[in-house]
Amino acid sequence: RKEVEQDPGPFNVPEGATVAFNCTYSNSASQSFFWYRQDCRKEPKLLMSVYSSGNEDGRFTAQLNRASQYISLLIRDSKLSDSATYLCVLTGYSSASKIIFGSGTRLSIRP
Amino acid sequence: DVKVTQSSRYLVKRTGEKVFLECVQDMDHENMFWYRQDPGLGLRLIYFSYDVKMKEKGDIPEGYSVSREKKERFSLILESASTNQTSMYLCASTREVGQPQHFGDGTRLSIL
């Protein structure tokens, strides 16, 4: 089983829709979780950290489910500018080599 | 804001050449990383460094070496470039493991 799995998509949704995607992980010792977005031919940029209690930043909500070992990202009222690839990232505690990137979920918002 | 600067956005080299990719960060971060990103494979860690002169192999170190002589600079070296090293190379830094990484703009390297 891969350490991190994401549905590659593409998710193609109309502007204004709500969209959600998950990222499952296999190592229960993973400590920190993040969502990054990556635009075509650009570098990944931090979107938000994911906290155990769940957290929101404007239209974006991130949640962590340790029991089922997944994190999720929900985007409400999607905008054309949300079109990007969303990467989940996990880190262990002790070693920088345990930073694991998912392959990304591609999201396309249509007018 | 953290700034991670990679020396080139686009680079074209020939097989067999020795290639240097440079990365500089301005936030006094201890940890620096080199990744390559290929379609369908996501980001793969080549090498990382957790302090000056310290380095550790990542998942795909073969054909690469690194140098960290100063805290702010982390160089990736392709000893003898091959066509299968054509890729997007991304440098990143972070103060502590467990904190988010900050990425440079990336270098699109083509080996002909």
Image (tube, rainbow, N blue to C red):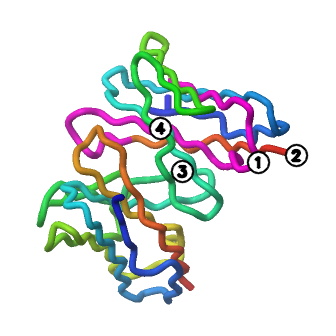
Q: Chain of mark 1?
A: A
Question: Which amino acid, mark 2?
Answer: Pro
Instruction: Give the magenta part as a residue range.
Output: A71-99
Q: Which residue is mark 1?
A: A80
Q: Nearer the viewer, residue A36 or B75?
A: A36
**Foreground label between 4 and 3:** 4
Where in the figure is residue B54, as x and y percent of width and height?
Answer: 13, 60
Image: B40 above or below A48: below
Q: Residue furthest top?
A: A67
Question: Of marks 2 and 4, which one's residue comes earlier in the chain?
Answer: 4
Q: Is residue B45 above or below residue B12?
A: above
Q: Position of residue A71 (x, y in %)?
A: 51, 25
Q: Are marks 2 and 1 in contact (CB under 8 Å)?
A: yes
- Give the CA distance from mark 4 to mark 1: 19 Å
Q: Residues within 10 Å of mark 2 (few under 14, many from 20)?
A: few
> Residue A58 appears in which quarter of the rendering?
top right
| Amino acid, disc 4 | Met
Q: Which residue is mark 2?
A: A111
- Amino acid type at circle 3 is Gly
Left or right of A10, for residue B58:
left
Dot 3 corresponds to which residue? B42
Give me the C-alpha separation between circle 4 and circle 3.
Answer: 19 Å
Q: Secondary structure at mark 2?
A: loop
